[in-house]
Amino acid sequence: MDATTGVSLELDDIQAGALYERPSPYVGTYLLLCIRDRRDGRELVRRLRRLVEPATAVGPVGETSVTVAFTYRGLEALGVPQASLDSFSPEFRQGMAARAAVLGDTGESGPERWEEPLGSPDVHVAIAVLSPDETQLEQVAVRAREAHAELPGIELIWRQDCHQLATGRTSFGFKDGIGQPAVEGSGRPPTDPRERPLKAGEVVLGYPDETGDLPPMPVPDVLGRNGTYVVFRKLHTKVAAYRSYLRARSATRAEEDLLGAKMVGRWQSGAPLALTPDEDDGELGGDPRRNNDFGFGDDPRGFKCPVGAHARRANPRDALDHEGSVDVRLHRMIRRGTSYGPPLPEGVTDDDGIDRGIIFVFAGAHLKRQFEFVKTQWLNDGIFIGAPLESDPLVGPRDGVGSFTVPQRPIRRRLQDLPPFVVTRGGEYCFAPSLSALAWLADLDT
Amino acid sequence: MTAADDAAIAPGRSVGPTSEFSLFFRVKPGEAAPLRAALTSLQDTPGYRPGDYGITIQTIHEARFVLFDDDTRLAFITSFDGPWEAYMDDFFTSGPTLALFDAVFNHVEGYEGLPDVAAVRSFVLGAEQGAAAYARNYGGTVKEIRKAQRVNAAFQAVLDHPQAAEALQHPALQPLLDEAAD
Ligand code: HEM
């Protein structure tokens, strides 16, 4: 029972990695497995079940965690009964590649250009191992490898390592992972004191959500309850193009930093524009008690933080409260993103051809009204801010070029010819079941 | 919402950023008069009075309630910015609008009433009918149109200035000068 909210979550049944922060700094590995033989598949799940820690087992700061999730095809390969498969959300059943047109994954980001085997029906099991250091990672990774290596019916089809860059920032140079909602019953206090913790059912299945209802939950209960949907996307970042773009439009380094911050809504240090609109404040950026304590209500026109900035789009906070058309609490998400690839050395503006970016990870109970809503209505589109032709300046898909408006007195600045800076390399919709569901899956005898 | 619900709903049509949305209800026998009264009092609510332009949902272009078939049926017809299925959940957690509509819906068949939001939701979605045809005569979201009106008002104020003609001579202002003659 959470003393502050009176909600009890069955933390001993929920995968820790789905609910809690990753360590920082971190190193990690993502593995995708294909189940070629059903019996081996169930044995794999039995072994993975022993590696997964419940949310009760972790301390206040992130420790090594193993998170296991399945795609629709994976559950099918394990022999989950059809009636049960049919009870999962429609988006999950379709899979991410089938949602490409909706999500804006077209052109360079289209599934036909995705990295093999992402988006293919062979992706069955996704495992994330995240650790504070290489030694611990290796210990757990070895056990994860043992879980599948000696099973001939299980094939490792993809591996992606990730690590926090030495700067503690992501490839574009920004601190990431700051804005996160708190969840009732999780025992973790909010970092944004203006945002009441979300109802548990927004993140974990089996509990009432913000609408007062139980989120639609797969059957049987043991399979759905205490589980959560997980989205992962490998997002390549065009860092050289991003830097060149900013450089070409700035007279000074300071102006470059400001334009970059206007696009994100935070300075590179993480300090929010809403609190420090004119210059970065490293101390504020690094202070978890203050760096998420702000709203946009006092800045409706976006003079401090543009209404089109990435973080303001992704979480408008109080900015839309008076509009009566949107309840921001229905569109929140837990993010567990990590960085992959080496940084582009400071100052370089020529592309070195190396793949770098983020593994975007979402956890939530509603694929459609959380992940897909934020992606399609707030990042890909500008209808909600009265700028239908503008998409997110940092992560928005743009077939040709786009624009971005920076409100400022006396005259707004409009950045034109904005190329895409982020390309989807692939991804999948997964379901991270509870510990008891893992046992249920291992014991299936269909 | 379950998968079955999803399939049953015929989404409305869109033109540019705007979607149409229409609901059709059956009036409870004998309740036509109180329903008309409820609509009159909705019409008297601040924001909904002619000239107020203050509908609580600010992304709505316009909305009407129509009684037809000898007051046995009620239609609610509107258009709003954004794809409608994305915003349905939000509508049902938006207290002020639901409370206003509650007084109207109470007079139509099948309505169980607040506070069961889930029941209200499936009731409303069950009454939705997608248009067979839908056209608009201007593009733009409510936000853009309001901005355009503010900008035009400002422009007219500039034109009313005694030195406007002189001030608009700069080549950068040619597009404005082109709009200044009438
Ligand atoms: C390569 C792609 C992306 C990059 C580089 C990126 C970067 C960032 C950065 C720098 C921040 C501000 C720091 C923070 O609050 O953590 C942020 C915030 C956020 N981003 Fe992204 N992001 C990316 C893609 C996405 C996508 C695809 C989504 C959702 C579909 C998303 C959702 C969010 C959310 C919800 C926040 C927090 C906003 C808040 O609570 O203030 N991001 N992102």
Image (spheres, rainbow, N blue to C red):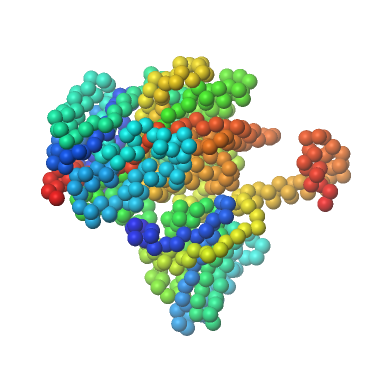
In depth, the one of A44 and B49 nearer the eye is A44
In depth, the one of B123 and A105 nearer the eye is A105
Which image quarter: residue A402?
top right
In depth, the one of A221 and A238 nearer the eye is A238
Q: Can you say whether A337 is above or below B66 in the image?
A: above
**Picture coordinates of residue A340, whole percent (x, y):** 37, 25
Residue at 39% in and 34% down: A114
Residue positioned most to the front: A112
Residue at 39% in and 49% down: A368
**Picture coordinates of residue A67, whole percent (x, y):** 25, 35
- Residue A408 in sight: no
- Residue A413 in sight: yes
Q: Does residue A72 appear to the left or right of A420 in the view shown? A: left
Residue at 50% in and 37% down: A396
**Picture coordinates of residue A297, whole percent (x, y):** 54, 43
Which image quarter: residue A292?
top left
Q: Quadrant of ligand 1?
A: top left
Residue at 27% in and 34% down: A32
**Picture coordinates of residue A249, whole percent (x, y):** 61, 25
Circle count: 0
Q: Does residue B107 appear to the left or right of A190 in the view shown? A: right
